[in-house]
């Protein structure tokens, strides 16, 4: 198994390590719920170096990105970031990604760990003739996520420039502890937070500095378990669970990441066709009406008929209810629609709800 | 160290015997492996159960795990506190985290279960 530059920190902190997409990653340190609460109320630190990081630059980079991603990169200002998808010709999702515009013709792309090789090869195959230089920087760069309402003051201690200037979904190339890095105000938790992209050799000193700066607010290292719970409550999609090449962005209720006005792109014809007819199935959020925990792969029923499958589920610490994401026929996707979840043979009543399940109150 | 007065099952349940009554819970190893427990589905009082049968489920933030009974009999009591405080199983698996009391129909089944020392060796062998 592969290890991130922060592996020794995880072991030293007593993390439980698991195999995640071929990486030996911390699933928890102090406990999933404790870490969850820490991120919702204070600040948590995640090692997300297992994710894939590519840089792409050159005169023809905009043409390239417009062709291989679904969102519109054109209006993205330098220093701004966007959520986007990479689709195949039939509109199936190859990956969901984040795109950061570092300069007019230079971008950083963050892709899922499990899709890193697949997407890099796909991009290489789809790069047009011309000036597009694509580089897989995943091994050279570490990635640390600092998340939670107290994260601005924690970041300020080591990178005041980013802490004071960054607006949501923006990024800044700056020095972090005297090494060049990228700090973005992005994340996967629904809280205010940052992601730091740093040379691998700086991962440990920056991690240590953030832990130290965060001590007064009770910062804790957090693992993939709490990360999954945090993202589910805000309805963020998890590749491989909620979306894959058999689902389209429109079915996944992620039409906001598809821009048909920008012209043709890979999958645009198929998606346009689906848009015109309306997708047959849609991803929705649901809540259980009695105690129980929905899980990936469980059946969704309506009036005794199988209508779809749960793609993600857990017990929401915030709502103290079973919550989940899943696919249902479009005509049953309206909030308020009664459905049922088959939890190991027992049918539990549930209801389709508007996403997200949780939204932070803005200060 | 596992408590000496209990007997253990390879599915990581424990049994405390008092006369014909067997109190059942899950071991410290099991609660630790599951992580934060958020919901426990227990059988109803009065249910007839057979040794080896799945009688309930433990849901944690990470996964779902079955609860098996290592003894046959009738469920005479379940822990009412676990409905609102399933985390008691994490905090005190051998005490406040008990799950059910079974009136045994065949107390000799206890003899097949592991002692604390045997269970510790079993855990050690599982790690390899």
Image (spheres, coloured by chain):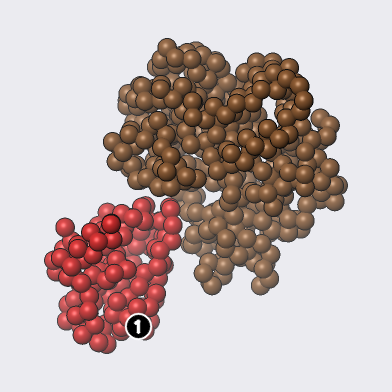
Q: Evaluate whether residue A154 shows in this view.
A: no
Left or right of A83 on screen, residue A53: left
Farthest residue, direction left: B4
Left or right of A244 on screen, residue A26: left
The answer to whether residue A175 is above or below residue A202 is above
The residue closer to the viewer here, B6 or A244, is A244
Give the colour of chain B: red
The residue closer to the viewer here, A38 or A268, is A268
Residue A249 in picture, x, y percent from top left: 71, 44
- Please tell me in which quadrant of the rendered image residue B100 appears: bottom left
- Please tell me in which quadrant of the rendered image residue A107 appears: top right
Image quarter (top left, top right, bottom left or bottom right) of the N terminus of chain A: top left
Tag count: 1
Q: Which residue is mark 1?
A: B50
Q: Residue at x 17, y 81 (%)?
A: B19
Give the colour of chain A: brown
Chain letter for mark 1: B
Residue A265 in picture, x, y percent from top left: 79, 35
């Amino acid at each position: 198994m592969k290890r991130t530059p922060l592996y020794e920190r995880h072991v030293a902190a007593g993390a439980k390590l698991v195999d995640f997409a071929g990486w030996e990653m911390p699933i928890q340190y102090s406990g999933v719920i404790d870490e969850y609460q820490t991120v919702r109320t204070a600040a948590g630190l995640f090692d997300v170096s297992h994710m894939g990081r590519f840089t792409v630059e050159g005169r023809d980079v905009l043409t390239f990105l417009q062709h291989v991603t679904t969102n519109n990169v054109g209006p993205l200002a330098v220093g701004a970031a966007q959520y986007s998808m990479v689709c195949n010709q039939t509109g199936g999702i190859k990956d969901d990604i984040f795109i950061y515009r570092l300069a007019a013709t230079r971008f950083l792309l963050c892709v899922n760990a499990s899709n890193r090789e697949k997407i890099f090869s796909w991009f290489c195959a789809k790069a047009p003739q011309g000036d597009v230089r694509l580089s897989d920087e995943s091994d050279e760069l570490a990635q640390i996520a600092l998340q939670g309402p107290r994260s601005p003051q924690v970041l300020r201690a080591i990178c005041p420039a980013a802490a004071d200037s960054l607006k949501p979904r923006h990024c800044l190339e700056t020095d972090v502890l005297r090494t060049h890095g990228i700090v973005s105000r992005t994340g996967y938790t629904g809280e205010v937070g940052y992601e730091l992209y740093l040379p691998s050799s700086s991962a440990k000193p920056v991690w240590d500095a953030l832990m130290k700066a965060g001590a007064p607010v009770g910062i804790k290292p957090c693992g993939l378990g709490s990360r999954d719970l945090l993202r589910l409550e805000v309805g963020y999609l998890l590749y491989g669970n909620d979306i894959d090449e058999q689902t389209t962005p429109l079915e996944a209720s992620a039409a906001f990441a598809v821009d048909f006005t920008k012209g043709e792109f890979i999958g645009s014809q198929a998606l346009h066709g689906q848009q015109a007819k309306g997708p047959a199935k849609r991803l929705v959020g649901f809540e259980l009406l009695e105690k129980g925990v929905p899980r990936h792969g469980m059946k969704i029923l309506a009036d005794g008929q199988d209508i779809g499958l749960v793609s993600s589920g857990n017990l929401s610490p915030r709502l103290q209810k079973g919550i989940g994401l899943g696919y249902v026929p479009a005509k049953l996707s309206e909030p308020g629609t009664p459905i049922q979840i088959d939890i190991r043979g027992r049918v539990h009543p549930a209801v389709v709800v508007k996403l997200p399940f949780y939204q932070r109150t803005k200060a | 160290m596992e408590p000496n007065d209990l007997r253990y099952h390879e599915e990581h349940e424990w049994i405390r015997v008092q006369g014909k009554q067997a109190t059942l819970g899950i071991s410290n190893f099991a609660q630790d492996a599951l992580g934060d427990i958020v919901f426990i589905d227990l059988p109803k009082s009065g249910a007839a159960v057979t040794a080896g049968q799945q009688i309930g489920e433990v849901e944690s933030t990470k996964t779902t795990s079955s609860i098996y009974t290592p003894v046959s009999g009738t469920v005479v009591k379940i822990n009412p506190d676990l409905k609102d405080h399933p985390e008691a199983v994490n905090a005190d698996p051998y005490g406040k985290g008990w799950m059910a009391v079974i009136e045994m129909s065949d107390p000799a089944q206890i003899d097949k279960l592991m002692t604390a020392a045997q269970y510790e060796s079993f855990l050690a062998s599982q790690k390899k």
